[in-house]
Image (cartoon, rainbow, N blue to C red):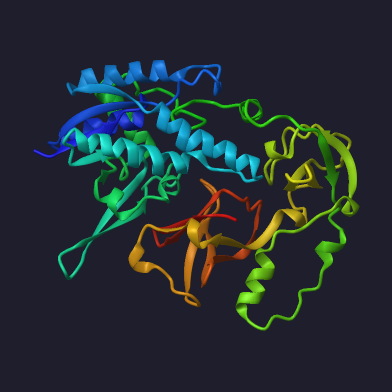
Amino acid sequence: MKKVVVGLSGGVDSSVAAYLLKEQGYEVIGLFMKNWHDDSVTISEECPWLEDSNDALIVAEKLGIPFQTVDLSAQYKERIVDYMFNEYERGRTPNPDVLCNREIKFDVFLKIALQLGADYVATGHYCRKGIIKNADGTETYQLLAGKDPNKDQSYFLCQLSQEQLAKTLFPIGELLKPEVRQIAAEHNLITADKKDSQGLCFVGKVHLPDFLQQKLKPKKGVIVEVPSTASQFAVATPEFHNEKEKLAFQAAKPEYSLEDGKVVGEHQGAHYFTIGQRKGLNVGGTKEPLFVIETDVDKNIIYTGQGKTHPGLFRHTLFVKEDELHWVRPDLVLQPDETMEVMARIRYRQPLQQATLYKVENGLYVDFKEAQSAITEGQFVAWYVGEELVGSGVIS
């Protein structure tokens, strides 16, 4: 009998994942990951992990499976929280959920499961795993979108490797969320009606400025409003000698200066803000709301524009550096000057967008058919062929 360790989070999805695996004849062990108890940095006033671990225990008892809690808070702090501070300090906006899957659930947690003699780990993610049988007898694993279009979580797993996928099962990937809740209700699982957890993976809701201020000190600076008629938006497109020149031009970040607009307010630190952000600027009196179009952490200036159609928010092309490029399917890796037609997204739940990948020596351009709003450094872009997520990278 194959042994599976399920990451029981205390939510309905992982509860049903454990139930389904037991029904399928696996030997199932429930493991709850405790990821936070650092008193020097408060992430949240609420402490959901106690309630969650209790719910996970009750589900395990109901299913008649062994259960234990593992404390991964040291690794979580080092690999996720410290990384977040570091990225924000550099003026980038990290995605902790993608990191958490790559570094914690499918690395630290997976290794613990294998030490317990498990053949697989399983999670309650809404995605599916495909297997391609190769001519030489080996197998290639596919990361496929979940069947529920409203809940597909493949984006959060965009950094997984073949080695990680080989050892992973996604039992609820073929189900819709209402079906998952129905299964939980039919089998009297305590989590059947529990609300989905929000916020940082496993940690709960986080008020980001408060969180960041514990390590990144407030620093007064100015908020500049750049009019949509500013000269840099009227720049005539130069003549390009080749596609690479054009892509480099389109992917270049706009450079603003104080002369491009007028000072309309003050902020407590450019590193607390992200491109596309509307809340927290506390500047009134504009016809349309202000959106952050660029942050300059070196000079501590935030540049904003009025309205969600402001030209400063839009770009056609983004760049991923070579060392931040990841292929879930290494057999599809592009060589310099090769291209690939894909569907891509730059944030979770964004509808997939048509794009062309263009490989160069030092990285990869993702060139979108339609201009994208709020392309943000530090976030992940993920690309798909059909319903398969084949690669991803950190936007630079």
Q: Position of residue 281 (x, y in %)?
A: 77, 35
Residue nearest the viewer, comparing 212 with 197 = 212
| 307 to 22, vertically: above or below | below
For the C terminus, the quadrant is: bottom right
Badge count: 0
Relative side of 323 to 14, left or right: right
Seen at 74% across and 35% down, the residue is 269
Q: Can you name the residue that lies furthest to the bottom here?
A: 241
Residue nearest the viewer, comparing 51 with 104 = 104
| 317 to 181, vertically: above or below | below
Whether residue 201 is visible:
no
Residue nearest the viewer, comparing 59 with 79 = 79
Q: Position of residue 214 (x, y in %)?
A: 63, 25
Seen at 66% across and 29% down, the residue is 209
Q: Quadrant of residue 205?
A: top right
Whether residue 341 is visible:
yes
Q: Position of residue 321 (x, y in %)?
A: 54, 61
Q: Can you name the residue that lies furthest to the left here?
A: 1
Relative side of 3 to 170, left or right: left
| 234 to 61, vertically: above or below | below
Seen at 86% across and 42% down, the residue is 287
Relative side of 145 to 228, left or right: left
Seen at 33% across and 33% down, the residue is 180
For the N terminus, the quadrant is: top left
| 99 to 340, vertically: above or below | above
Q: Position of residue 174 (x, y in %)?
A: 30, 45
Q: Quadrant of residue 329?
A: bottom left
Relative side of 167 to 126, left or right: left
